Amino acid sequence: MAFKRVPQVFNSSLKEVTIGTGDSAVTIGGENVLPLYGFDGPVKNAPKVGIELSDLGPNKSLPGIAAFYEGLDTIPAMAKRACEAPGASFFSLTLESSDPAGEDRSVDECAALCKEVANAVNLPLVVQGSGNAEKDARLFEKIAGALEGKNVLLMSAKEENYKGVAVAAVTAYNQKIGAESSVDINLAKQLNVLITQLGISGENVVMNLGISAAGYGFEYIASTIDRVRIAALSQNDAALQMPVITPVAHDAWSVKESLVSEEDFPDWGPLERRGISMEICTAAALIAAGSDAVILLHPESVAAISKMVAAFV
C-alpha cells in the first residue's frame, strides 16, 4: 500500500510580533505548523536572523570580524555596517558596558548611544542590557523613552523587574519586550501570565527561554522550546503562544571550542572557524526546536543560517 502523508496543521497559531517600522519592519511568529514544517503548510513568517554588536566594540582579534568592521571606529558606524551583513533581518546592540560589575556606564550614556545607533541603522533594533535586573529596569525605561516611535525590542524583562520594564516599554512608549525565563516551561508561562495581567497583549511580547551552546546541556534548551511550541499549538495554550527569540552569540563564543588557541590545540583547527561552527550548530538546532529568531555575532554565521532557513521554507 502506498504511503499517504497527512499534513499536521493545528487550529491554533503563534502570536505575531512586529519590530521596527516601515519597509524594514520584521514580524516573527504566526505559525500554525511545527518548526520548519513547510511541507505541512505555509510557514507564515520564516525564522529571522539578527546580527549582534557589543557597545564595547567587536573582537578584532578574529580576522573575519576585523575585516568586516575595518576602518570603522564608532559604534553607530559599526552598527550601520552590521546591517549590511547578508541574511541579517535585524540588528541587536548589547549594552555590555552598562554592567555594574564592569564599566558600569550610566543609564543616560547608554540611552544616548542607543539613540545614535537607532538613527544610523536601517534594520529593526533589538537592545540587550547588562544582565543585571536592577540596572536593566532603569536602563530600559530610559531607552524606551529615548527611542519612542522606533518600535524596538528590549531584552529582557525578568521576574525581578518585569513590572517596571513592561510598563515603561510597552504601556508608556509602545515598544516590545522579551520575557526572559530560565529553561523551564512553567517559569516561562508564569512570567507571560504576570506580564499579560498588566494589560499587555501577547503581540508585544517575545519569549527568551534561555540558551546554552550545542553540547553544553543543550538538550534542556531544545526540549523546553519544543514543549513550549507543542503546548502553544496542540493545546491552544495562549500563555505560551508568544514567539521565541534566542540570543546565541554570547554562549556560542564563550565555550572552550571557541576560546582556546590553535597553538594549544592544533588538531582543532583555526579558532575563528571553530567559533563560527559552534554558532551555526547552536542556531540551527534552536530553529529546528522552535526558536522564531536567533541573534548571532559573526557575519558568516548569519549568512549560513539565513540560507538554511530559506532552503526549508
Image (tube, helix red, strand yellow):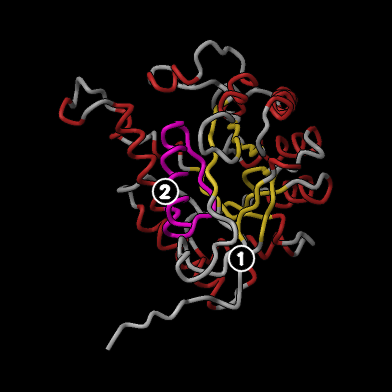
Q: Quadrant of residue 187?
A: bottom right
Amino acid type, callout 2? Met
Q: Position of residue 71 (x, y in %)?
A: 53, 10
- The mark found on residue 308 in the picture is 2
- The mark found on residue 150 in the picture is none
In the picture as drawn, the residue positioned furthest to the right comes out as: 172
Position above or below: 152 against 309 = above
| Residue in front for this viewpoint, 128 or 133 | 128
Amino acid type, callout 1? Leu
Indicate whether residue 301 is drawn in magenta: yes
Q: Upstream in the sequence, badge 2 or badge 1?
A: 1
Q: Nearer the viewer, mark 2 or mark 1?
A: 2
User: Which residue is located at x 72 percent, y 63 percent?
Assistant: 196
- Left or right of 251? Residue 131 is right
Q: Position of residue 91 (x, y in %)?
A: 60, 35
**Which residue range is magenta in the image?**
286-313
User: Which residue is located at x 40 percent, y 58 percent?
Assistant: 222
What kind of element bears circle 2?
A: helix
- The mark found on residue 14 in the picture is 1
- Left or right of 125? Residue 40 is left
Structural distance between the alpha carbons of marks 2 and 1: 22 Å
Position above or below: 275 against 266 = below
Total of numbered circles in the picture? 2
Q: Residues within 10 Å of mark 2 (few under 14, many from 20)?
A: few
